[in-house]
Amino acid sequence: MKTFYRISSIILILIACSVVGIFYIYTTQNIESTYAAETSHTVYTIKQDFIRDTVRNQIQRIESERNSSIEQYEKHLDSTSNLFENVYHNSTEEEFIQFYKNHFNLRTERDFWQAALWYADTGQILFDSGLLSTADIPYDQYLLEREDTYATSALKQFGNIQMFYGVPLESIDRMIKQKVAGSIHQSEFAEDTYIWVNEVVNYEGGDNYAIRRIHPNLKDTEGMYLSTNMTDIAGNFPYLEELEGIKENGELFFTYFFKRKNTDEIAKKLTYAQLYKEYDWIVAMGIHVDDMDSYVQQANEQSRKVTQSLLPLFVGMLVLLVAGSFLSLIFLERIRSRRDKRLLEEESSRDILTRALTRRIGEKDFNKSFYEYQKDQANNPAIMLFDIDNFKTINDDFGHSTGDQILFEVVQSIANYIRVTDRIYRWGGDEFIILCDGVRPENSFAFADSMREVVTSSVQIASAKLTRKVTISLGVAYFHTEDKTFQDAIARADAALYAAKRTGKNRVELS
């Protein structure tokens, strides 16, 4: 009988172990599948946000460069007009005509400006830089027809002398395109990603519908024509899909197969593209999908090692601990999954350059603060909006790499000064917002001004030419009972910042 019970016990134990083992295998596979799906979704979303934001930032830089160049030439035109008027009134007519010719024959002027000079009464042409070289019509009619093609221009008359001078948009755009191409070729991103540009010449598609303008991976093919009939290795029509998406929404995400950078290996690529209509440029960026899969595989491998190490515990506890171990395993795996997901989200919430929190996180935090303020108006944080004074001049004089370094140093100097409960967000470009709980309105000016002094005393640009202190201007605001959203308070902070700029910069203004 003892033998029977012993054998029966052994059999029951073996059965229990088998059941535990089956449950274990089923459970771990189910957990790994769930974990892989969640990790893959998180990584995919982060990468989508990265390539979309990078393309949008590139387009914003192009627009900013273009507007800045036009503004510079408008100022140049005003000074040129004043110069001509002064020379005319202080010289003979022959001397003025010669001066005008010499001015626009200079290389620095000839490369961008178009100019003409003629007698108003007879129409006799005294100087023409090429305006009418191919047109046989009066100047006035010709200039009227081409007015929209100039970024800035002037039609002047001194006595019997009439003149025209202006900068064609084409000249500015050519300069900007060359600068953008050089910048994109020199840009480096992780995982062999890069930005490329195609110029649409026919929105109806077909052969020669676009030109490959900038492509760091295929520099020798820049300038070649593209066709919407082209297919990838899987038979997809990526150019057709891209063109249709751009025409419908101005932007899109899509996938296709393309070779990796600096290799002949073909891989599936997730791409985001957006149209910059001024140049008919499709600006795009992509990342190979299997590069994202490596993150998921690494996470799964770590999860698998942990779950396998729990097998002896399952066997040792037998049937009595199967249920508890099963639930514990699920609980631990879910905690690990949430933790890793939280770490990934925390990394994505930081601005890559300055390490400040992103605007996306800021909008969530401001919504939460505004909601708490509506429940209890005693919870009214100080909202401090600031930017770097003359930041564009820093970029122009010292280069964008120095500008990036200044952004980082300013944020770090403020982050080291403010309290651990305060949060700093990059709102856009060189504009940042600090959310400060517990700062009363009567103390806000002193607190903001002390941050301004920290930046002034600790951040400066040192070069071979000169040393320049870096300053910031701040606008401070609080929530009001009549506010509809947190944006109303930010608008007041922005107005205060504008007032600080207008009244001298390097100062603090309260809304």
Image (tube, helix red, strand yellow):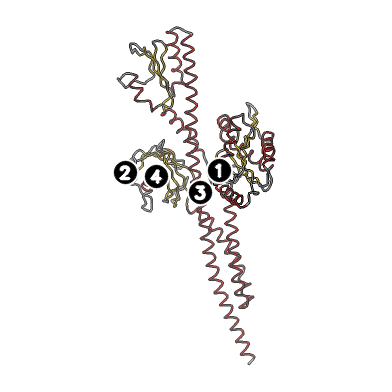
Which mark, residue 49? 3
Element type at mark 4? helix
Inspect the image, locate mark 3, and give the three-letter code of the amino acid beneath it.
Asp
Query: Does residue 420 sit above or below 153 in this rendering?
Result: below
The answer for how far apart the CA atoms under marks 4 and 3 are is 18 Å
Inspect the image, locate mark 4, and give the three-letter code of the amino acid beneath it.
Ile
Disc 2 versus disc 1: nearer the observer = 1
Which residue lies at the image location 69% right of the left edge and 38% below the top edge?
Answer: 446
| Residue denoted by label 4 | 246
| Residue denoted by label 2 | 206
| Residue denoted by label 1 | 488
Quadrant of the drawing holding the C terminus: top right
**Residue that lies at the very extreme toward the left in this rendered image:** 136
Element type at mark 2? loop
Of the two numbered discs 4 and 2 on the same chain, state the one appearing first in sequence. Answer: 2
The answer for how far apart the CA atoms under marks 1 and 4 are is 34 Å
Of the two numbered discs 4 and 3 on the same chain, state the one appearing first in sequence. Answer: 3
Q: CB atoms at circles 3 and 2 under 8 Å apart?
A: no
> In the image, residue 505 lies at what x, y percent?
62, 31
User: Of residues 234 and 452, which is closer to you in this image?
Assistant: 452
420 left or right, relative to 206? right
User: Of residues 286 and 481, which is closer to you in this image?
Assistant: 481
Local crowd at mark 1 within 10 Å, few (<14), some, or many (≥20)? some
**Residue that lies at the very extreme toward the bottom in this rendered image:** 1
> In the image, residue 275 lies at what x, y percent?
42, 41
